[in-house]
Amino acid sequence: MDDLFETLPRHTCSWIKALSIPTKGKGAYYKYEGFWNFRILLEGAILAQRTFKAQPSDVFLCSSPKAGTTWLKALAFAIVTRKQFDAASSPLLTTFPHDCVHYLESGLEQINENHKNSDFPLVATHLPYASLPKSVVDSDCKIVYIYRNIKDVLVSHYCYMIEVAKLQVEDVPFEVVFDEFCQGISWYGPYWDHILGYWKASQERPGRILFLKYEDMKMDTTSNVKRLAEFIGYPFSIEEEKTGMVESIIKLCSFDNLSNLEVNKNGNYRPEKIGAVANRHLFRKGKDGDWKNYFTDEMEKKMNKLVDEKLIGIDLVLK
Ligand code: A3P
């Protein structure tokens, strides 16, 4: 793989530059198939592209980082396992949502294990549509894509990197990360191209990709959870609706509930593979509009213009 990586465009991201410890090149983003990412995740993606065999019953949960992946994973997991576990016995009470549904590019072994040992059908990925393994695109797998207001994604990403890298805000000014992001340089970015890839695919193959918007899910969680359940092939029965199953899943997966569980407050994620990340970093505020605390008027105008230019003619609201 070294040969390949030597040919790829490379960028050392601002928050890595701010670290005082040497990172031996591990903190650089590489541009592969049009998107920026860390080498270790690209190696995982390439392995998945070469070896992953999708099954028609698989459901892919796709997103850019910070668009609401953790919430979507928890909801989908609670929906598909509700016959085995009720809200009082759900594995989500003691297991980090990212350990309930694994990422294709970093959890391939566990996903293959699930394929062998159960009919558990959920697979998550941050990969752009164009980088999905061919077997996923060729199969009838269902794909759920969650997206979020671009400004909140950027702020969430900024705060996450600062926390994970144990930096101070002064070490990496928001303006620097904002400028990088606007150039399309971000984790799995450009963010707008990520969305566009899935959007175009959804137009070409209607009925195969469900688009969910984080803000809509917050505003009307019930309808969106029902849409999700229906789409992935686990619709709620009338009886379940009457007995409060939908509400119980929503409560189980709510930000307030998940972020206060011991496992999510004090546990660690992926200690061996990528370096430990505290689970709590995946639960920050869980609110809309925090960008207003970070953006200047000028930044807001610039971002709005960028979105108008990039998503011209696309019926998705990102700002
Ligand atoms: P904030 O940083 O704005 O608080 P991802 O899971 O894709 O990495 O996205 C993380 C964002 O989703 C964070 O946003 C996090 O707080 C929020 N989040 C995590 N769990 C959530 C939940 N159950 N409900 C709503 N938002 C949630």
Image (cartoon, rainbow, N blue to C red):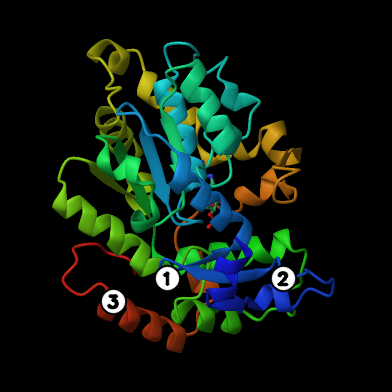
Describe the element under mark 3 as helix, strand or loop.
Answer: helix
Q: Which residue is mark 3?
A: 310
Locate residue 182, reporting x and y percent.
45, 80
Q: Quadrant of residue 198?
A: bottom left
Q: Is 142 above or below relative to 68?
A: above
Q: Which residue is mark 1?
A: 190
Instruction: Give the amino acid at mark 2.
Output: Gly
Q: Which residue is mark 2?
A: 25
Asked whether the viewer can see residue 62, the reply is yes
Asked whether the viewer can see residue 257, the reply is no
Q: Is 267 above or below relative to 281?
A: above
Tag 2 or tag 1, which sits nearer the N-term?
2
Q: Is mark 3 within 8 Å of ligand 1?
A: no
- Quarter of the image for the N terminus: give it: bottom right
Describe the element under mark 1 as helix, strand or loop.
Answer: loop
Label 1 to label 2, Cα distance in Å? 21 Å
Left or right of 224 in this view: 95: right
